[in-house]
Image (cartoon, rainbow, N blue to C red):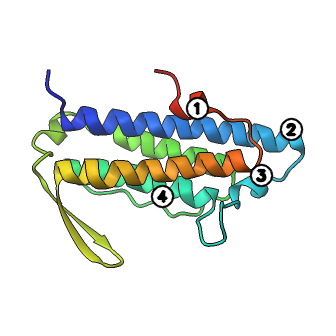
Amino acid sequence: MSLSIYRASIPVLVRGLKNLSHLLTKGEAYAAAKGLPASALIEASLAPDMYNLARQVQLASDSAKGCGARLAGIENPSFADTETTFADLQARIEKTVAFLQSITEAQLDGADTRQVTMKLRSGEKHFVGADYLFNFVLPNFYFHVTTAYDILRHKGVELGKPDYLGAY
């Protein structure tokens, strides 16, 4: 069985988002147990010039839903980036997962060679589907999931590698 672009993208991104949801659940429980306002974690970042936890979750979501949409050749849903609570962040993850799970394998047939154009601040970037997935989306997605993990860990949330990797 060869590796399909669907199998290399949609289930992988869904799993990463579900693991991110688990990290947020542990972060919320930690804040409650320590008597911290949720904002102490949600607004935290690793360095002054880095995005906070909420933005890391938003960007992981954007990477995942954008990937699914671009590879399927469908409209990329727009989310408002207004999440300020753990419940808001969890809802965004749930919406993203639901969108990804609505994409069928048939929609990604031929996506490995589909032309993908992204509008970035620096201008348009053009990819072939497989290069877009493996060289742009997955590194970007995991950067933001990892940074969210790192922010929570840095703030004292008891997380380990099994929390990041999830069940497999």
Q: Earlier along the polypeptide chain: callout 1 or callout 3?
A: 3
Name the mark nearer the viewer: 2 or 1.
1
Q: Position of residue 103 (x, y in %)?
A: 28, 39
Comparing 148 with 81, the one in front is 148
Vertical position of residue 92 compared to residue 33: above or below:
below
Q: Earlier along the polypeptide chain: callout 3 or callout 2?
A: 2
Q: Position of residue 104 (x, y in %)?
A: 23, 35
Label disc, if present, on residue 59 of the rendered structure: 4
Comparing 113 with 139, the one in front is 139
Label disc, if present, on residue 38 of the rendered structure: 3
Name the amino acid type tagged 2: Ala
Could you give the CA–CA distance between mark 1 and mark 3, rounded to whole angstroms?
23 Å
Q: Which residue is mark 1?
A: 161
Name the amino acid type tagged 1: Lys
Could you give the CA–CA distance between mark 3 and mark 2, rounded to whole angstroms?
11 Å
Could you give the CA–CA distance between mark 4 and mark 1, rounded to whole angstroms?
21 Å
Q: Residues within 10 Å of mark 1 (few under 14, many from 20)?
A: few
Comparing 13 with 160, the one in front is 160
